[in-house]
Image (spheres, rainbow, N blue to C red):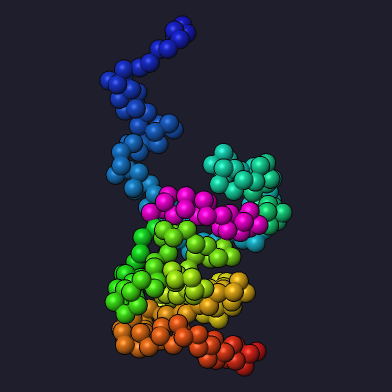
Amino acid sequence: MSRPVGFHHSQETKKKISLSHLGTHYGRGIAKTPEAEQIRRAKISRALTGRYPTEETRLKLSERHKGIKPNKRQLQSLKLGTIACQSIEANKKRKLTMSKNWQNPDFVEAFWKANSIKPNRAELKLEVILNKAFPKQFKYNGNFNLRITLGGLIPDFVNVNSRKQVIELFGDYWHSEKRIRSWKRTELGRIMAYASLGWQCLIIWEQELKYEELIIAKIQQFMKGDRTYFKKKKVEKENEK
């Protein structure tokens, strides 16, 4: 006898069915509780610990993923249409699209709002120093509140008195050699990136915040247009080559 359309078991009946499946090939003897789920995941984790897929398996997975189309959320964020996610052409198009997007103030503002970007402790400390020693000279732009983006980069502090000068605060961890994956994230790379757009850039490291007087002197030298610091970094880079 077939069930009528829209028929649903009661909660009591569902519990009875669940209990009847324990110990069978349906329930496999494991009750559907959070504790049982943790035990199951722990067993799988222990079984897979130290095991890595072979090169042959990786190639098979790579081939299997080729041609997979992005879902609606990926289409909206990457704007790739029906391009395959894992193809080389798709990656190139994605990078080009994101590069253009980061130069669009509306896109950057929407991204910053969605991720609730706020100044960290180091940025707040530098902001206090700037407001005290250089009032009404530099304003914080790290959360894009000034809507200033230069070549896809968002400077931390920008001079608001018609001088093309920016200050970048480099975190000791995020800009260390272990974390840097892009030339623009290096000290000289960032300076040259802004210089190509006609802007001067001063880099201040997180560890330098301990010495307020030295930071003030460094900024004063920078505001006078002294390019000695930039030339020194350029010479160091050429010597490394």
Residue 117 is situated, as x and y percent measured from the top left of the image, at: 39, 58
Residue 63 is situated, as x and y percent measured from the top left of the image, at: 69, 51
Residue 65's place in the image compared with 230, above or below, is above
Residue 48's place in the image compared with 7, above or below, is below
Residue 16's quadrant in the figure? Answer: top left
From the viewer's side, name the closer residue of 236 and 10: 236
214 left or right of 170 in image? left
Residue 25 is situated, as x and y percent measured from the top left of the image, at: 44, 33
Q: Is residue 200 visible?
A: yes
Residue drawn at (30%, 42%) of the image: 34
Which secondary structure class fits the magenta region best?
Answer: helix
Residue 215's quadrant in the figure? Answer: bottom left
Single out the residue that lies furthest toward the front: 162
From the viewer's side, name the closer residue of 54 and 8: 8
Q: Is residue 183 visible?
A: no
The count of marks equals: 0
Residue drawn at (41%, 58%) of the image: 145
From the viewer's side, name the closer residue of 49 and 125: 125
Residue 212's place in the image compared with 70, above or below, is below
Residue 160 is situated, as x and y percent measured from the top left of the image, at: 43, 68
Residue drawn at (40%, 85%) of the image: 220
Residue drawn at (45%, 82%) of the image: 223
Residue 205 is a magenta residue: no
Magenta-colored span: 94-116
Q: Quadrant of the C terminus?
A: bottom right
